[in-house]
Amino acid sequence: MSLIASQNKRIVILVSGSGTNMLNIAEQCAEQRVAGKVVAVIANKADASGIAKAAELGLETAVLAHRNFTSREAYDQALAELVTSYQPDVVVLAGFMRILTAEFVQPFQGRLLNIHPSLLPKYKGLHTHERALANGDTEHGVSVHFVTEELDGGPVILQAKIPIFDGDTIDDLQQRVHEQEYRIYPLVVNWLCNERLRLTAAGAELDGQLLGPSGYAAEDE
Ligand code: NHR
Ligand code: GAR
């Protein structure tokens, strides 16, 4: 590891929605808390409000509407070309709502992160807060993982837990999860920027140590 502050890595962020995680990461980069710079924010639909927010901040933005493509593969190939044009070191999914095929995942494997609002492997896919409430869970949370071809199935890097209280609504959980997302996602992005993280055949490694199924520093259960 170098004692000199690492050079800024190029980060591309993909969004579909409000983009608050994207804004948080961009801010942390601007404050040098993450060793990267956001070189583009890309959405799969024009009305993603994250795009307007990114543009307001003066970030480069692009929209590639999936509606204009006839197959997932064709879309993913076009998306991969667009992302590649920004020469990213790190690609961050932040509320990106399209399942990605191998066309997209393969070129970026090992550089591609997602944040998923559940304690993976619980509740892969959509509507995680509803499902946690419906099951009467007392604990919930969020996971940052490497993206692989298996949906929400790539190795977990870091998780944060939240409690579920009687009478909680989906909005309560969403808000509690968001607070944790703003803490853990920049941390993991910074690890990747600093080349401390690696995706290997065995799983995710941090500083050469293979991480367990719940990622770094998880309590044993
Ligand atoms: N792609 C791969 N290959 N692997 C992952 O781990 C991925 C991924 C794409 C997105 C984010 C994920 C999440 O964190 C993510 C992880 C969308 C859906 C989904 O069902 C599921 C999981 C995630 C994102 N999307 C619908 C689809 O048909 C569309 C839903 C909508 O537009 O509202 O793509 O949860
Ligand atoms: C986040 O809570 C993220 O975990 C979740 O969407 C929210 C996006 O918020 N991701 C998914 O549900 C992926 N399927 P943001 O746009 O304000 O960052």
Image (spheres, rainbow, N blue to C red):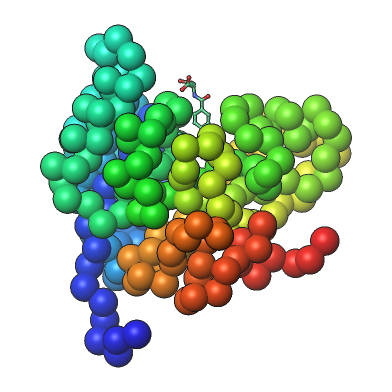
- Compare residues 5 and 169 and report the one nearer the observer: 5
Name the residue rendered at 78%, 48% in the picture.
139
User: Hey, which residue is sitting farthest front in the picture?
Assistant: 201
Determine whether 79 is above or below 173 in the image.
above
**Residue at left 34%, top 71%?**
194
**In which quadrant will I find the N terminus?**
bottom left
| Residue 22 visible at all | no
Q: Residue furthest left?
A: 85
Answer above or below: position of 1 versus 190: below
Residue 218 as seen in the image, left or right of residue 187: right
In the picture, measured across the screen, residue 1 lies left or right of residue 120, that is left
Residue 145: tell me if it is visible.
Answer: yes
Counting labels gives 0
Q: Position of residue 80 (x, y in %)?
A: 25, 35
**Residue 190 at what x, y percent from top left?**
39, 66
Q: Which residue is located at x 54 percent, y 47 percent?
A: 154
- Quarter of the image for the C terminus: give it: bottom right
Q: Position of residue 112 (x, y in %)?
A: 38, 49
Q: Image quadrant of residue 110?
A: bottom left
Q: Foreground residue, 67 or 77?
A: 77
In the rendered view, tell whether residue 17 sits above or below residue 198.
above
- Give the image location of residue 205, x and y in percent: 51, 67
Depth order, front residue of 139/106: 106
Report which quarter residue 89 is drawn in. bottom left
Which picture quadrant has residue 74?
Answer: top left
